[in-house]
Image (spheres, rainbow, N blue to C red):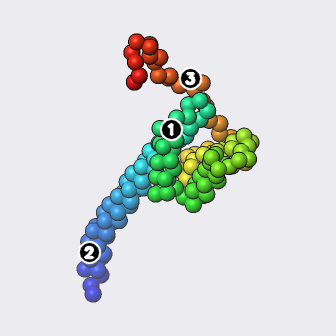
Amino acid sequence: MDTPVLIAVISAAAAVVAPAISFYLTKRKERDADWRKYRFELYKEFVVAISGIVGTDSTPEGNRAFAKASNTLLLIGSNDVLTALYQFQDEIGVSNTSKSVARHDALLSRLIWEIREDLGIPRTSEASDFVAHLWCSGAEQEKPPLRSPSQGPS
């Protein structure tokens, strides 16, 4: 084959292949970003759900939201996140008769650390140095209004 023809064929192939590779890599980056955003939203919902089971903020609705959010993590959580979740659930479960504040805090910290690691959050410290604490609002639950005797039974 003649050298100028060979150069023209190679140039034409490069003109088609380079944009195709660029398109593929761009789409892959977009899909990765979308996936990361989706995972972040589900993890965020999970952390919000944890707030519904803390101290005096704990409600039956909060417990249901926590259960749903925990189950949703089965879809997106890494093995390390799920292992940390199961250990945390075992600690806070009603069936655990030997609960420990120190073990609770250590397992919660590990769970949050694993989530941060799974999301690739920059500047996440080592697991042994990471400490997470839950905050309770301290607000009292709303109590149903008292009925006067003249109102009769509800």
Q: Residue visible at 31% across and 63% down?
A: 19
| Rendering coords of residue 45 (x, y %) | 47, 42
Q: Secondary structure at mark 2?
A: helix
In this rendering, the answer to whether 39 lies above or below 23 is: above
10 Å crowding of disc 1: few (<14), some (14-19), many (20+): few
| Mark earlier in primary sequence (3, 1) | 1
Give the mark toward the camera: 1 or 2. Answer: 1
Give the mark toward the camera: 3 or 2. Answer: 3
Q: Residue visible at 44% across and 13% down?
A: 148
10 Å crowding of disc 3: few (<14), some (14-19), many (20+): few
Residue 139 circle label: 3
Q: Cα distance, mark 3 to mark 1?
A: 16 Å
| Front residue (pair 109, 142) | 142
Q: Which residue is mark 1?
A: 60
Farthest-out residue, bottom: 1
10 Å crowding of disc 2: few (<14), some (14-19), many (20+): few
Q: Residue visible at 35% across and 58% down?
A: 27
Viewed as shown, does residue 29 lie left or right of 56? left
Residue 8 circle label: 2
Q: Secondary structure at mark 1?
A: helix
Residue type at numbered disc 3: Ala
| Rendering coords of residue 68 (x, y %) | 47, 48
Give the mark toward the camera: 3 or 1. Answer: 1
Q: Cα distance, mark 3 to mark 2?
A: 76 Å
Residue type at numbered disc 2: Ala
Question: For the N terminus, which image quadrant?
Answer: bottom left
The image quarter in which residue 130 lies: top right
| Front residue (pair 68, 150) | 150
| Front residue (pair 134, 58) | 58
| Rendering coords of residue 89 (x, y %) | 61, 50
